[in-house]
Image: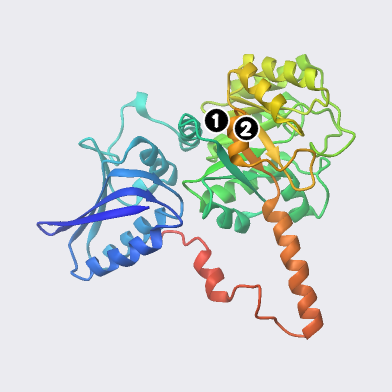
Amino acid sequence: MIQSQYKIVGEALVVSLIGRLDATTWESFWNGLLLKLQDAPKKLIFDLAGLEYISSAGMRVFLLAERRMREKGGSIELRSPVEIVRRALEISQLQSLFPIIESGRSKDKPKEPSETRLYGHSAGDAFRDRLATRRILPLIGIYDVFSAQLAAKRFEGVFCSGFGYAASQYGLPDIGYVNWHDIMDFATRVRQVLPATHILVDVDDGFGEEPIAANTVKNLEMNGVSAVMMEDQKRPRRCGHFEGKQVLGMEQYLVKLKAVLAARKRLFVIARTDATDWNDGMKRAVLYAKAGADAVMVEAVHDLKYVEEVAQAVKVPLMVNQIHGGKSPNWTLQEMEAAGVAIAIFSTPCLFAAQYAIERYLDQMQKHHKLVGENTVGMAECVKMLYTPPMG
């Protein structure tokens, strides 16, 4: 829910925002703001002190407002964002378009060197801040930028899934075809259209030995992703819910994990174990947490009691994976949160839903020999959903 208060101060219109500006609220707020802008103020000031959260969809308000004010010869300014909103604005790099004022200091003025943070570092810290709320964080598996936009309109974060990428880009199963350059390009394109969305990237086993794994996470952090997940599988690796997977020795994986942790600055690193023996999985999860992983994941588990035991043992956030037809039951977010889960990834809902919808729609086209008007969107609905980059 979003509430807004309007006040005229000289030639400026001051808009105070209270609540959450996201996919469900931004459009109604924008329509109301347009009516106020008919009076043609010289300056538009957004007071963000009461804004609790902003998504990438909510950012559209500022981009549209900046464009409208620039067309009319006016200007825009953002003031007093709270920490989580400030970081979202920093990630989006909106300060390149207009000033962001906080605590009497303009964000477009140089910071002290100790305060300077790279784009990718801010994303990692924003991810940590979200987990600090102690509310479970669902991340929706995506297979391309289009599915990422659909997911980000409804959820706080997305998961760049190796399963989804292999299927959509190669038409192949998730058994090791994805490489580090492809996944980096994929994640970077997602970040470009979702500047304020948490992005977790599946880096498989690091795509090779320690130098490749370290270089991969270093580049992903520089390109703005929030977190990475690296598994302890032995090659040839495969989807964690497939049969036949094998794991590295614990010490062998720790060498790679420590190389990744040394290469990152503030990127959030999740160590995943694919151990099929539960006792081995518990030992690995505890060991990886002690080695410095920011969170751990136990893959393909089917007992919430075991999940609860791992969560209590590791002392860092725990992540689990949900996939239709996989080895884990279809738990609710409430059930997982009660068991101590901090992050829940849903690896393939977009991919599987797309297959279901496309097959049925094309069956109808084949039957009727023309486009079918039911169970689809039109051109206007599609274009409306797409990201519009800032002009100028």
Instruction: Determine whether 351 is above or below 261 in the image.
Output: below
- Decide if residue 258 is in sight here: yes
152 lies left or right of 102: right
Report the Cα–Cα distance between label 1 and label 2.
Answer: 8 Å
In the image shown, does 83 or 332 lie closer to the viewer?
332
Q: Which residue is mark 2?
A: 217
Q: Which residue is mark 1?
A: 267
Give neighbour class at mark 1: few <14, some 14-19, many 20+ (Cα, 10 Å): many
Q: What residue do we see at 71% from left, 61% from top? A: 354
- Where is residue 379, by image quadrant? bottom right
Contact (CB < 8 A) between labels 1 and 2?
A: yes
Q: Earlier in the sequence, mark 1 or mark 2?
A: 2
Q: What residue do we see at 53% from left, 49% from top? A: 155
Where residue 246 appears, x then y in whole percent?
86, 28
| Tag 1: amino acid | Leu
| Tag 2: amino acid | Val
Which of discs 1 and 2 lies nearer the camera? The answer is: 1
Where residue 375 appears, x then y in whole percent?
66, 73
Where residue 308 appears, x then y in whole percent?
65, 25
